[in-house]
């Protein structure tokens, strides 16, 4: 059997599942709709894994021209291609597996009446999965815009899923307006690329651009399409929607948003750059590195600082995701295969860890109807298992060896260190601060460290007590075994990402194929199978382990200090301007997105327009 | 082919952005988003235009007739569908917001801060 035939199924199976649940969900009992949804999601995951395994032997690229509409001998044609390379197939498989975990985790969720709509939540999750898998696999720029919007629209709906409550609607609104705007910026860029090249396929556009010198249209296209993808990736200054959406979205949705959707934005930018703009007619490497690394450093620092000062646990985790996205952008932005390989492992492990942390937070929410660090102070001492998982997740987020987060961080920061030594410091400090924030909250909530009340009326936690409803219908008395198993399994997966040498080797060779301009085009257009040799596997080294231990120690130290002592007035005053930017006002967020467009243009222009 | 359609597309995009930034009403904001999106329609159609070209429907014209680019028209159609979905969903959210908060003024909806 031809493995390429499986690629469309990876996207179609969850779509079918969503249709089945949307129609049949009214009649099916809750348990049946849960089983059906898990079956569809798992099938898609299995298909992606088969394609990945099949591609690993021999030809690493799995190419399917949908409907047999391949380009003619001259290269002209309007066919849409699905192109699975090890990187995109691996990400697809990871996405699908995380969807399965989320569906299992959420089987007690949304039990409140009306019960007859029991199929709608899993149906939306499956649609979301289809959008994300399609976005990973497509080799066509317009197609990727459509999948981008599909996952966007489903994510807005999922964020505002509890329409009876006030705050989810606001978060969904900001999310929807800013992300749709990003989508339209992306489409404008796609239109400009079509105007220049007459093509829509990534490989075809890249080839056409190779034959000409860069001009303002190409630069504008790069800025617009990247901006759209960076909105999805929640890079500063496009990030404002993310904390608002994550703080209010149902916990299982947060697991997916933080675990993979945001990272898909980073994947999209990287794929776009290497396939389309990395050639002589695109954006020179220095300009791209300058753009991505600057944005990445800004994102990492803002995310770290903001996550430290949150007391709403979901918002804290959301800002920590922003910080890590910054690190990912630096990792891929140095444009080396090693940096990309490290980032790939980092993304996988971070997805597992962050989803596990959200899962633990969800347990707190469903038991105590609150995720406020101050309100929960010491109350969760009765949940030692949840606490242990949460603290382990916090340590993994700091970059503690041998978690995959540590391996990914080590490889990415070593590669980034070749570009600038201070980038290594950014990796260490940012992961220590965000991990430390998670640990500090954990110490307060699960161990009751520090004073019970502390003088802190900062917003972010400012809310009426008790208006945060549990998501399970009634408050949980006993924690269901699935809600504990899922975070445990996710953490184990993050651990495996650091320990299984085959995964590290796979990431190394996948990044070697991914971070190259010509290999993709010749595989997609000429059917040439690229040699997979020459790739150095991502591996542990002493410096990486030591830096990982250093950031863990820093994070733990910060956590103990922060938990013992109430926040200083001086730091509060210093951070106040940054806090005020997160105004909760959609208009402000849009204005910042426009400023971000200008920033990208300023960063990418020098070197692009002046090169010979 | 003149520069005018491209300038119009850029103008529409900026006008929509201005409306979004200064909006005092979420229904108006969703409308502005739709305006922003219509700049993509204008840009796409302008890109596919050919002087003297006719509609790319070959039912009643010779197959070698000069036609405008059908690809961008297909893209625009897809874009319209995407836009309709987004607008409908966002308007539904606005209705719910009005039910829960009794207001659609973003200045009064600021529970998510800091």
Image (cartoon, coloured by chain):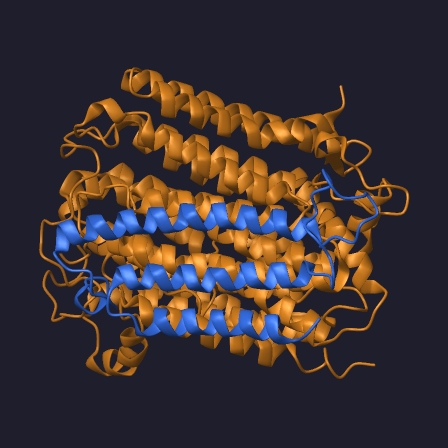
Chain colours: A orange, B blue
Quadrant where the N terminus of chain A sits is top right
Left or right of A152: which side holds A475?
left
Q: Which picture quadrant has residue B8?
A: bottom right
Front in this rendered view, residue A398 or A73: A73
Image vertical order of residue A211 relative to residue A247, above or below: below
* Above/below status of A22 relative to A226: above
Identify the image quadrant of residue A518.
bottom right
Residue at 48% in and 47% down: B82
Residue A402 seen by the camera: no
Q: Extreme front residue here?
A: B60
Answer whether residue A256 is visible to the viewer in this image: yes
Residue A76 image point, x, y percent: 83, 47
Quadrant holding the C terminus of chain A: bottom right
Residue A566 at x, y = what percent? 18, 70
Q: Is residue A157 left or right of residue A64?
A: left
Q: Residue A548, how many percent across, how many down?
A: 51, 59
**Residue drawn at 29 percent across, 63 percent down:** B28
Counting every numbered tag in the picture gives: 0
Image coordinates of residue A351 in percent, x first then y, are: 47, 46
Q: Hey, which residue is sitting farthest right in the picture?
A: A73
Report whether A542 appears left or right of A32.
right
Task: Kindly identify the residue that appears in the image at 70 percent across and 47 percent down.
Answer: B56
A108 and A76: which is toward the camera: A76
Instruction: From the viewer's perspective, tell me whether residue A581 is left or right of residue A491.
Output: left
Q: Name the residue: 35% across, 69% down.
A: B20
């Amino acid at each position: 059997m031809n493995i390429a035939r499986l690629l469309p199924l990876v996207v179609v199976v969850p779509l079918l599942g969503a249709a089945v649940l949307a129609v049949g969900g009214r009649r099916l009992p809750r348990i049946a709709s849960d089983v059906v949804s898990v079956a569809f999601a798992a099938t898609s995951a299995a298909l992606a894994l088969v394609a990945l395994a099949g591609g690993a032997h021999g030809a690493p690229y799995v190419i399917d021209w949908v409907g047999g509409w391949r380009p003619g001998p001259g290269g002209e044609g309007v066919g849409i291609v699905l192109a699975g390379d090890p990187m995109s197939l691996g990400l697809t498989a990871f996405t699908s597996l995380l969807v399965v975990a989320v569906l299992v985790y959420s089987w007690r969720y949304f039990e409140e009446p009306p019960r007859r709509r029991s199929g709608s939540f899993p149906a939306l999750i499956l649609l979301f999965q289809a959008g994300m898998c399609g976005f990973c696999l497509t080799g066509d720029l317009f197609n990727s815009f459509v999948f981008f919007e599909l996952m966007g629209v489903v994510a807005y709906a999922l964020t505002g899923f509890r329409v009876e409550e006030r705050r989810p609607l606001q978060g969904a609104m900001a999310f929807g307006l800013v992300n749709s705007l990003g989508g339209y910026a992306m489409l404008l860029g796609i239109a400009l690329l079509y105007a220049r090249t007459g093509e829509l396929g990534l490989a075809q556009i890249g080839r056409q651009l190779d034959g000409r010198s860069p001009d303002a249209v190409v630069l504008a296209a790069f800025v617009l399409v990247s901006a759209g993808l960076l909105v999805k990736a929640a890079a500063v200054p496009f990030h404002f929607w993310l904390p608002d959406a994550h703080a209010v979205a149902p916990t299982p949705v947060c697991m997916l948003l933080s675990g993979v959707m945001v990272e898909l934005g980073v994947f999209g930018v990287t794929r776009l750059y290497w396939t389309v703009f990395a050639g002589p007619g695109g954006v020179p490497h220095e300009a791209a590195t300058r753009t991505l690394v600057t944005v990445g450093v800004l994102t990492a620092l803002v995310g770290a600082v903001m996550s430290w000062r949150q007391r709403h646990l979901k918002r804290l985790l959301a800002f920590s995701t922003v910080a890590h996205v910054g690190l990912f952008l630096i990792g891929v932005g140095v444009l080396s295969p090693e940096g990309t390989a490290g980032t790939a492992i980092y993304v996988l492990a971070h997805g597992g860890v962050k989803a596990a942390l959200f899962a633990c937070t969800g347990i707190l929410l469903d038991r105590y109807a609150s995720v406020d660090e101050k309100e929960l102070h010491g109350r969760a001492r009765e949940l030692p298992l949840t606490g242990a998982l949460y603290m382990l997740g916090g340590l993994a987020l700091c970059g503690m060896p041998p978690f995959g987060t540590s391996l990914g961080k080590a490889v990415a920061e070593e590669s980034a260190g070749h570009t600038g030594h201070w980038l290594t410091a950014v990796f260490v400090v940012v992961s220590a601060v965000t991990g430390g924030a998670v640990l500090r909250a954990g110490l307060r909530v699960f161990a009751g460290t520090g004073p019970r009340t502390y003088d802190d009326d900062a917003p972010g936690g400012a809310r009426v007590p008790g208006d945060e409803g549990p998501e399970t219908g009634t408050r949980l008395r006993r924690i269901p075994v699935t809600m504990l198993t899922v975070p445990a399994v996710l953490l184990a997966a993050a651990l495996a990402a650091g320990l299984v040498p085959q995964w590290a080797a796979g990431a190394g060779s996948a990044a070697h194929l991914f971070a190259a301009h010509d290999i993709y085009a010749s595989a997609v257009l000429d059917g040439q199978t690229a040699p997979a040799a020459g790739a150095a596997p991502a591996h542990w080294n002493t410096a990486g382990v030591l830096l990982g231990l250093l950031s863990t120690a820093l994070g733990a130290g910060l956590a103990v200090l922060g938990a013992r002592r109430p926040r200083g007035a001086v730091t509060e005053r210093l951070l106040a301007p940054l806090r005020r930017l997160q105004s909760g006002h959609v208009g402000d967020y849009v204005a910042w997105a426009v400023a971000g467009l200008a920033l990208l243009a300023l960063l990418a222009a020098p070197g692009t327009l002046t090169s010979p | 082919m003149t520069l005018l359609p491209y300038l119009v597309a850029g103008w529409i995009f900026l006008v929509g952005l201005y409306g979004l930034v200064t909006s005092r009403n979420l229904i108006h904001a969703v409308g502005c988003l739709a305006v922003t999106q219509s700049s993509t329609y204008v840009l796409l159609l302008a890109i596919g235009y050919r002087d003297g070209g006719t509609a790319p429907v070959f039912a009643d014209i010779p197959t070698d007739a000069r036609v405008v680019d059908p690809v961008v028209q297909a893209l625009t159609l897809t874009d319209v569908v995407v836009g309709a979905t987004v607008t409908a969903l966002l308007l539904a959210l606005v209705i719910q917001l009005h039910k829960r908060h009794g207001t659609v003024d973003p200045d009064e909806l600021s529970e998510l801060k800091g």
